[in-house]
Amino acid sequence: RKEVEQDPGPFNVPEGATVAFNCTYSNSASQSFFWYRQDCRKEPKLLMSVYSSGNEDGRFTAQLNRASQYISLLIRDSKLSDSATYLCVVSMDSSYKLIFGSGTRLLVRP
Amino acid sequence: SQTIHQWPATLVQPVGSPLSLECTVEGTSNPNLYWYRQAAGRGLQLLFYSVGIGQISSEVPQNLSASRPQDRQFILSSKKLLLSDSGFYLCAWSTGGEETQYFGPGTRLLVL
């Protein structure tokens, strides 16, 4: 079983739609969680950290469910520029290592 | 502000040739540095990380090596490339004690 699992997609949605991605992680000792965004043939860029209480940044909302070991990302009012691959990332306790999921691809169409 | 540089941006090398990829970070001191590889359609795989000059930890056995000759310089090397070494190589940095990592623009390597 992979340490971090994501649905690869692609999720194909119209502009203005709301879309949600889930990610599950296998190690209950995981302490920190992130969503990164990666455009085609570019480096990953931090989208947002995921806090236990959930957090929102504009149109983006991240949630953490420790009991079920999953993380979610909700994107409201999708824009064409949101088209990218979204990487779920988990960090272990007192470790420098980040474990990356393989990513979920989002395509927003006009 | 901090910036991270990688070069070259793209590289085509024959099997059996040597490799040297360089990464430098500006605007911070004593960063943690990382090398990742991303194969086509795959997730990022951590290859090496370093918490200080001359301190290298290897995550996977392979024909690659890493060195950190200066505080903000991280080098990925190979004596003889394999076809399976093709991929997108990404360098990243983080501040000591922080887990968020920031990536360089990457080097796309094709071994033929």
Image (spheres, coloured by chain):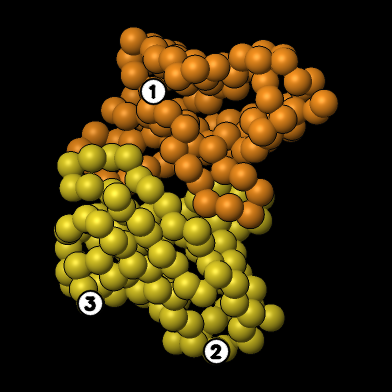
Chain colours: A orange, B yellow
Q: Chain of mark 3?
A: B
Asked whether, in this view, residue B100 is left or right of residue B111, the answer is left
Tell me the quadrant of the picture where the C terminus of chain B can be found.
bottom right
- Residue drawn at point x = 62 percent, y = 45 percent: A39
Q: Please count the marks in the image.
A: 3
Q: Chain of mark 2?
A: B
Q: CA distance from mark 3 to mark 1?
A: 35 Å
Coordinates of residue A29 in the picture (x, y in percent): 29, 28
Per the image, label 2 sits on a secondary structure element best described as loop
- Residue drawn at point x = 55 percent, y = 89 percent: B17
Q: Which residue is mark 3?
A: B69
Q: Which labelled disc corresponds to residue B17?
A: 2
- Three-letter residue code for mark 3: Pro
Asked whether, in this view, residue B24 is left or right of residue A84, the answer is left
- Three-letter residue code for mark 2: Ser
- Residue drawn at point x = 57 percent, y = 34 percent: A86
Which residue appears farthest toward the bottom when viewing the image?
B17
- Three-letter residue code for mark 1: Val
Q: CB under 8 Å between callouts 3 and 1? A: no
In the figure, residue B61 lies in which quadrant? bottom left
Of the image marks 3 and 2, the number of the one nearer the N terminus: 2
Front in this rendered view, residue A10 or B81: A10
A36 relative to B107, above or below: above
Coordinates of residue A67 in the picture (x, y in percent): 38, 11
Q: Which residue is mark 1?
A: A50
Residue A85 visible within the image:
yes
Per the image, label 1 sits on a secondary structure element best described as strand
Residue B60 visible within the image:
no
